[in-house]
Image (cartoon, grey):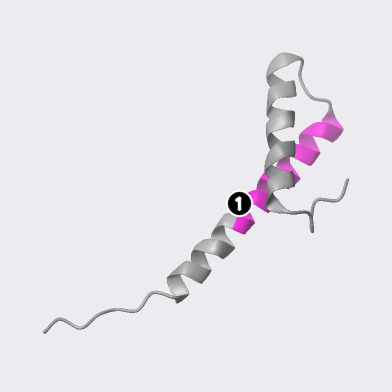
């Protein structure tokens, strides 16, 4: 499945599913690759949200 445009909640859900499967029975090469792509998508999303928050911050002058 292509998660590049999927809602972040779906990405997180799939990351958790793969994590659980990895701990229980292991992942095949394709699943490991999917897991890495999903993690990258999640990290990029967190970074983008943080950037937006930082851009909205205004410094106050000390008086």
Q: Residue at x 47, y 68 (%)?
A: 53
* Residue 56 in the image: above or below residue 30: below
Number of marks:
1
* Residue 63 in the image: above or below residue 49: below
Quadrant location of the C terminus in the rendered image: bottom left
Quadrant location of the N terminus in the rendered image: top right
Q: Residue at x 60, y 51 (%)?
A: 43
**Within the image, what quadrant is residue 7 found in?**
bottom right
* Residue 14 in the image: above or below residue 41: above
Measuring from the top left, give residue 44's x and y in whole percent.
63, 57
Magenta region: 29-45
Circle 1: is it few (<14), some (14-19), or many (20+) Cα within 10 Å? Answer: few
Furthest-right residue in this view: 1
**Within the image, what quadrant is residue 29 found in?**
top right
Left or right: where 28 falls relative to 44: right
Q: Which residue is mark 1?
A: 43
Predominant SS along the magenta part: helix
Question: Looking at this view, is 1 or 28 the one in front?
Answer: 1
**Within the image, what quadrant is residue 46 found in?**
bottom right
* Residue 21 in the image: above or below residue 6: above
SS under mark 1 = helix
Taking the magenta stretch, the answer to whether it contains residue 39 is yes
Q: Residue at x 51, y 68 (%)?
A: 51
Furthest-top residue in this view: 24
Measuring from the top left, give residue 10's x and y in whole percent.
74, 45
Question: Looking at this view, is 61 or 38 the one in front?
Answer: 61
Q: Residue at x 69, y 47 (%)?
A: 9
Taking the magenta stretch, the answer to whether it contains residue 22 is no
Measuring from the top left, give residue 15's x and y in whole percent.
70, 37
């Amino acid at each position: 499945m292509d998660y590049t445009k999927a809602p972040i909640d779906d990405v997180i859900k799939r990351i958790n599913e793969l994590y659980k499967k990895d701990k229980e029975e292991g992942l095949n090469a394709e699943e490991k690759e999917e897991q890495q792509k999903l993690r990258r998508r999640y990290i990029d999303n967190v970074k983008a949200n943080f950037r937006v928050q930082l851009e909205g911050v205004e410094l106050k002058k000390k008086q």
